[in-house]
């Protein structure tokens, strides 16, 4: 990963770090499946207009659209619905910890489904360290809540697994600009969710929701989906699925830093330890620090 890739990853971690808070506000008034529909539909419409203005054309072959449908199902329809439903019953912190398992699922999927993103000792050590850092950062005491809402926790884990698999599937459409991939995936997500919401959910719920819920829904759509997916698919194309999924380790760090900068929050010792573990994990996944140390020792 280049310096530019790392900067994109940091920006993405901020955009997705806030999504758990927006979700917690919106899902209290808007049902999970309906919230997922509006999130992807608003984001898809926004990106479609932008893509046309820029002058991009969309794929015309059936194979690409089949891949976009698969990506939509795993990245949005399944993952959003499960995580949104889970957040009705679990805290933001616990949801963040469970979401921190995404790279673990993603790296296993990449190992089984690709030839150039294989498991290595460095990646295994990095993933374990990164996940431990997420737990420390958000607060180990939250793990005492595990088992209180088992189905909701399993839903969050299943959502993380789905998103990790979706990242690997995104490699199949590498040849297209990120805005085309993001628009295509979000459009297919809208088409998949629309009949489900009309049949089984409450599509009119946003019209009676509070201003806070509406603004949170719009933030999820425009900031945590439209803008975030542009960056995310660019990262996958440039750095691979495993590296792009590092963002789920960095998102809690971004949330903590925003709290310090904007809300005058303080940092505890366990949070410093958590950030250190996350950075050690990322360094191990990246591999360059270990190679540099190895060269120094050989010399």
Image (cartoon, rainbow, N blue to C red):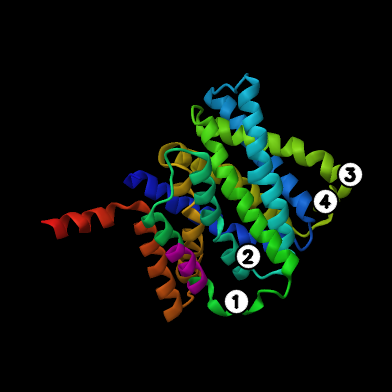
Q: Are marks 3 and 4 in contact (CB under 8 Å)?
A: no
Inter-mark Cα distance, 3 to 4? 18 Å
Direction left: furthest residue: 299
Q: Is residue 120 magenta?
A: no
Quick one: label 4, few (<14), some, or many (20+) residues within 10 Å? few
Give the labeled residue for mark 4: 207
Inter-mark Cα distance, 4 to 1? 34 Å
In the drawing, what numbered circle is on residue 105?
Answer: none
Asked whether residue 223 appears in the rendered view, the answer is no
* Mark 4 or mark 1: whose residue is earlier in sequence: 1
Element under label 1?
helix
47 to 150, vertically: above or below: above
* Mark 4 or mark 2: whose residue is earlier in sequence: 2
Residue at the (52%, 26%) spot, across then down:
54
Residue at the (83%, 53%) spot, across then down:
205
Tell me which segment is drawn in magenta: 128-136
Inter-mark Cα distance, 2 to 3? 28 Å
* Mark 2 or mark 3: whose residue is earlier in sequence: 2
Residue at the (63%, 49%) spot, across then down:
162
Inter-mark Cα distance, 2 to 1? 10 Å
Residue 285: percent from left, percent from top: 38, 54
Element under label 4?
helix
Residue 117: percent from left, percent from top: 43, 43
Quick one: label 1, few (<14), some, or many (20+) residues within 10 Å? some
In the drawing, what numbered circle is on residue 142?
Answer: 1
Residue 280: percent from left, percent from top: 36, 64
Residue at the (54%, 59%) spot, across then down:
17
* Mark 1 or mark 3: whose residue is earlier in sequence: 1
Q: Quadrant of the C terminus?
A: bottom left
């Amino acid at each position: 990963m280049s310096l530019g890739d790392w900067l994109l990853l940091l920006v993405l971690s901020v955009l997705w770090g806030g999504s758990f808070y927006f979700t917690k506000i919106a899902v209290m008034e808007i049902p999970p499946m309906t919230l997922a529909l509006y999130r992807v539909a608003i984001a898809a419409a926004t990106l479609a207009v932008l893509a046309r203005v820029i002058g991009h054309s969309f794929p015309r072959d059936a194979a690409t659209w089949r891949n976009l449908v698969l990506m939509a199902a795993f990245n949005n329809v399944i993952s959003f619905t499960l995580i949104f439903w889970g957040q009705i019953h679990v805290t933001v912190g616990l949801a963040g910890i469970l979401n921190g398992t995404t790279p673990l699922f993603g790296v296993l999927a990449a190992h089984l489904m690709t030839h150039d993103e294989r498991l290595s000792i460095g990646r295994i050590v990095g993933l374990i360290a990164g996940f431990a850092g997420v737990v420390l950062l958000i607060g180990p005491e939250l793990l005492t809540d595990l088992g209180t809402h088992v189905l909701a926790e399993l839903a969050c884990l299943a959502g993380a697994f789905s998103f990790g698999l979706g990242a690997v599937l995104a490699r199949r459409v590498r040849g297209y600009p990120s805005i085309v991939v993001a628009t295509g995936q979000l459009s297919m997500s809208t088409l998949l969710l629309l009949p489900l919401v009309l049949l089984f959910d409450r599509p009119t719920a946003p019209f009676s929701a509070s201003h806070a819920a509406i603004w949170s829904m719009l933030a999820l759509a425009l900031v945590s989906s439209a803008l975030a997916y542009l960056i995310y698919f660019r990262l996958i194309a440039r750095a691979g699925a495993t590296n792009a999924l590092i963002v789920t380790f960095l998102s809690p760090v971004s949330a903590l830093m925003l709290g310090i900068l904007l809300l005058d929050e303080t940092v505890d010792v366990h949070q410093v330890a958590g950030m250190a573990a996350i950075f050690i994990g990322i360094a191990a996944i990246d591999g360059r620090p270990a190679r540099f140390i190895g060269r120094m020792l050989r010399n």
